[in-house]
Amino acid sequence: MYKISQRRYLGNKNSILDFIEEIIQKEIGDFDSFCDIFSGTGVVGAYFNDKDTKIISNDLLYQNFISLNAFLNSDTYYVKKITKLIEKFNATTASKENYFSTNFGGRYFSNDVAKKIGYIRQEIKKLFVSDSINLKEKHILLTSLNYSIDRIANTVGHYDAYITKEIKAQKFVMKMLDIDSEKNAKNEVHNRDANMLIRDIECDILYMDPPYNSRQYCDAYHLLENLSLWQKPKVFGVAKKFDRSKIKSEYSLKSATESFDDLVVNAKCKYMLLSYNNMAKRGNERSNAKISDEDIIKSMSKRGEVKVFEKSYKAFTTGKNVCKNNKERIFFVKVIRSVVN
Ligand SMILES: C[S@@+](CC[C@H](N)C(=O)[O-])C[C@H]1O[C@@H](n2cnc3c(N)ncnc32)[C@H](O)[C@@H]1O
């Protein structure tokens, strides 16, 4: 079975979950609701998930909305039915070319595996359109497909490029997901821009983990987004990306500081936590942080006193610029002031 944490995802917070928990225990104690507004894989919300807590998850990317629904919403599904479908998909050999194989075969995957992935994606669509599976079951199957692809793709973990060496034999296997349904009763999942969603929700704890540099998640994971949406758009360039102009994040652009301020000012919560890397002006241009520490503190101070917690970690780097002594930081505020501008 796949656990929610078994996905390769840039900036995932698997390794600092205990650090986040420590801060919450020390500064907050009990709480009833937790919003993970830039959820990505959803591991942070999932960590605090229990049957009496409402976890609100959200991400701009549709592929994440799918997996957040699969793991964290409370809709019903039939395990036996899905297990049988997964067995059937695993036993399939697809011989015909399809949208996925023509665009991605021989690049990110062997041609045979790409044909199989495209075939399975089309089958999942057919099963849903013919009412043979419900929306939750569709989300579970698509998540299993995405997690399985992630394990074999001929990449370094993201899809900005593929490895141009000969593709090794790939064993593509789908698995059921490890879903703890009993804990999901109160949860909500959204697929919105965080700055829009913030105006419509209330929570005890708001956890913010936005992208911190100019690297757009829709670029790094375009292939999984394309497969998840399955609108079969035209793709271009060596990496075979589709037009992502509508899903670019403000947090990876110059406007990041302004967007962050708007988010903080409009939040209706009791506590705020922000994860933000300290790579400002230290790595290469693309890895430089978009929001300065001064601006983070200026915005968050509008709502209360800011405390900063730090933990050392190993930095992600794509090239020669290995930054030593990187620290994962959490900026914390107990909200005492309502919206001021
Ligand atoms: C650093 S990652 C979050 C990682 C996550 N905490 C985890 O452990 O997997 C940032 C996420 O924010 C999402 N994102 C970027 N801009 C957004 C926006 N304006 N609204 C909602 N989500 C956004 C990205 O798609 C990405 O998944």
Image (spheres, rainbow, N blue to C red):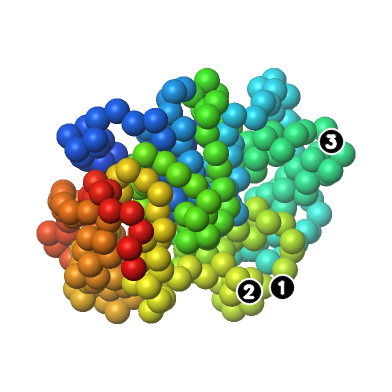
Q: Which residue is nearer to you in this view: 207 or 4? A: 207
Q: Identify the residue at image location x=40%, y=66%.
A: 262
Cα–Cα gap, marks 2 and 3? 31 Å
Residue 144: percent from left, percent from top:
59, 39
Answer yes or no: is residue 320 visible.
Answer: no
Would you say the residues marked 2 and 1 are in contact, meaning their CB atoms lie under 8 Å apart?
yes
Residue denoted by label 3: 131
SS type, badge 2: loop
Can you tell which of label 2 and label 1 is closer to the viewer?
2
Q: In the shown orientation, is residue 225 left or right of residue 26?
A: right
Residue denoted by label 2: 243
Residue 120, quarter of picture = top right
Q: In the shown orientation, is residue 168 left or right of residue 94?
A: left
Amino acid carrying mark 1 in the image = Lys
Answer yes or no: is residue 222 visible.
Answer: yes
Residue 218's place in the image compared with 55, above or below, is below
Can you tell which of label 1 and label 3 is closer to the viewer?
3
Residue 291's place in the image compared with 183, above or below, is below
Residue denoted by label 1: 234
Quadrant of the rendering where the C terminus is positioned:
bottom left
SS type, badge 1: loop
Q: Residues within 10 Å of mark 3 (few under 14, many from 20)?
A: few
